[in-house]
C-alpha cells in the first residue's frame, strides 16, 4: 500500500482504529511505501530539507519525514519505508549528490520518529547510476541501522543495462542477513535476473497495469487479449494456470468484456496476472531451496521469451 494515498483517503486516523490488515481483510505481510516518489512526480510544489510540500484539491500538505513515519505507524503495516528524495534518471551528478544528502537526513529523522515496535522499517538506497554515491548511501544507512534495505531510484526510465549494472554493484554492499528489496521491478524476466543478483523482495504495479492495458502474462510470454484472433478462442488465458480466471473463463469471454469496456475484464486479467507472478515466485523459492534456481530460471526464460 502507499502511505501517501492512505493519508489522503481514508486517513491515518481511520486506519489506526482498525489497522490495515483488518481494513482490507488481508492477514499476510503488508508493506507501505512512503509516497515520496508520488509526491515528487505528481504533486510536488516545493521540496526543501524539511520535507516536500504538495497540493491536492487546492489544499497544501507538508509531508515531513516525521509525518510520513507517524502515518505509517498509524496505518499498522508490517514494513514501513523511509521518506526518500528520488531524482530523475536524467539528473546530473551534482543534483543526485545533493539529493542523496537529503535522503540520508530524512532516513535518520524517520528512524528517530519510528515508534511502532510491531513494525519493521527499511532504509532506501539512492544515488542514481553513480557507484560512488550508491556506496556512500549504503554506508550512511548502515550507520543509522534499519531492518532491511531497498534499492530505489531505478526503473524510472534508465536503460535496462544501466539498471542491472547499478543493481549488480549495489546489492553486494547490503549485508546478507538483511532483506534486500528492489523497488518498482515487476516483469517476470527482470525479477528472476534480480533474484540471481541477490534480491529478496519486489513490488510493482506491473501485473495490474498490464491487465488494465489488455495484456495477459503467461508461461509463453505476454499477449494482448483484444486482438481479433481471441474473439472466438475458447481456451483459458494460460493452459498451465490454475487461477480462478483460467479455471472459469475463456480468452473469448475476456476479449468480449474488454471490447464492451466492462471493468470485469480488467479484474479477471488482474487476478490471472497477479496469480502468475505469485506462482512464479513460489516456484523460484522452491528452486532455491532445492539448489535448482539456475535450471528453473533457464527453463522459465526459454518458454517466456520463446
Image (tube, rainbow, N blue to C red):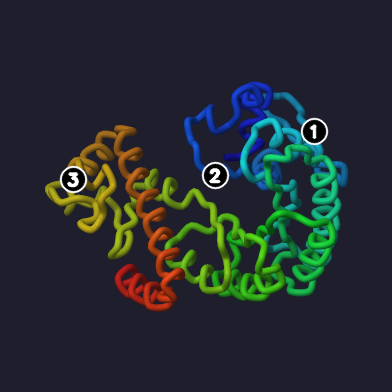
> In the rendering, at what x and y percent does residue 101 appear?
85, 58
The answer to which image quadrant residue 173 occupies is bottom right
Query: Is 119 drawn above or below residue 145 in the view shown?
Result: above
Which of 232/181 is in front? 181
- Marked residue nearer the N-terminal end (1 or 3): 1
Which disc is residue 250 wearing?
Answer: 3
Where is mark 2, residue-wise?
29
Please tell me which residue is depicted at 80% across the width and 51% down the height of the picture.
107
Q: Residues within 10 Å of mark 1 (few under 14, many from 20)?
A: some
- Marked residue nearer the N-terminal end (2 or 1): 2
Q: Is residue 140 left or right of residue 296?
A: right
Where is mark 1, residue-wise?
62
Q: Is residue 254 left or right of residue 123?
A: left
Distance from the alpha carbon under mark 2 to that under mark 3: 32 Å
- Marked residue nearer the N-terminal end (2 or 3): 2
Query: Is 92 drawn above or below residue 75 in the view shown?
Result: below
Please tell me which residue is depicted at 26% across the width and 48% down the height of the picture.
226
Distance from the alpha carbon under mark 1 to that under mark 3: 48 Å
Distance from the alpha carbon under mark 2 to that under mark 1: 29 Å
Which of 80/225 is in front? 80
Quadrant housing the N terminus: top right
Circle 2 SS class: loop
> In the rendering, at what x and y percent does residue 183 appear?
60, 56
Amino acid at each position: 500500500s502507499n502511505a501517501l494515498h492512505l493519508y489522503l483517503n481514508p486517513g491515518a486516523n481511520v486506519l489506526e482504529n482498525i489497522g490495515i490488515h483488518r481494513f482490507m481483510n488481508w492477514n499476510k505481510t503488508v508493506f507501505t511505501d512512503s509516497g515520496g516518489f508520488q509526491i515528487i512526480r505528481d504533486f510536488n510544489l516545493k521540496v526543501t530539507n524539511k520535507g516536500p510540500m504538495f497540493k491536492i484539491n487546492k489544499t497544501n500538505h507538508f509531508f515531513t519525514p516525521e509525518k510520513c513515519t507517524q502515518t505509517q505507524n498509524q496505518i499498522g503495516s508490517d514494513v514501513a519505508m523511509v521518506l526518500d528524495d528520488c531524482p530523475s534518471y536524467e539528473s546530473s551528478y551534482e543534483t543526485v549528490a545533493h539529493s542523496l544528502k537529503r535522503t540520508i537526513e530524512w532516513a535518520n529523522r524517520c528512524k528517530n520518529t519510528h515508534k511502532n515496535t510491531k513494525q519493521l522499517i527499511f532504509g532506501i538506497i539512492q544515488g542514481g547510476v553513480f557507484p560512488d554515491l550508491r556506496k556512500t548511501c549504503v554506508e550512511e544507512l548502515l550507520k543509522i541501522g534499519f531492518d532491511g534495505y531497498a534499492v530505489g531510484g531505478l526503473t524510472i526510465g534508465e536503460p535496462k543495462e544501466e539498471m542491472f549494472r547499478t543493481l549488480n554493484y549495489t546489492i553486494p554492499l547490503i549485508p546478507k542477513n538483511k532483506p534486500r528489496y528492489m523497488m518498482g521491478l515487476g516483469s517476470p524476466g527482470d525479477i528472476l535476473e534480480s533474484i540471481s543478483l541477490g534480491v529478496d523482495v519486489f513490488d510493482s504495479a506491473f501485473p495490474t497495469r498490464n491487465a488494465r492495458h489488455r495484456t495477459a502474462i503467461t508461461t509463453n510470454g505476454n499477449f494482448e487479449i483484444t486482438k481479433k484472433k481471441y474473439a472466438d478462442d475458447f481456451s483459458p488465458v494460460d493452459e498451465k494456470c490454475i487461477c480462478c480466471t483460467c479455471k472459469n473463463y475463456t480468452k473469448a469471454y475476456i476479449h468480449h468484456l474488454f471490447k464492451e469496456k466492462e471493468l470485469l475484464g480488467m479484474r479477471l486479467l488482474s487476478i490471472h496476472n497477479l496469480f502468475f507472478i505469485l506462482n512464479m515466485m513460489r516456484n523460484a523459492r522452491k528452486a532455491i531451496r532445492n539448489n535448482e534456481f539456475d535450471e528453473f530460471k533457464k527453463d522459465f526464460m526459454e518458454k517466456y521469451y520463446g
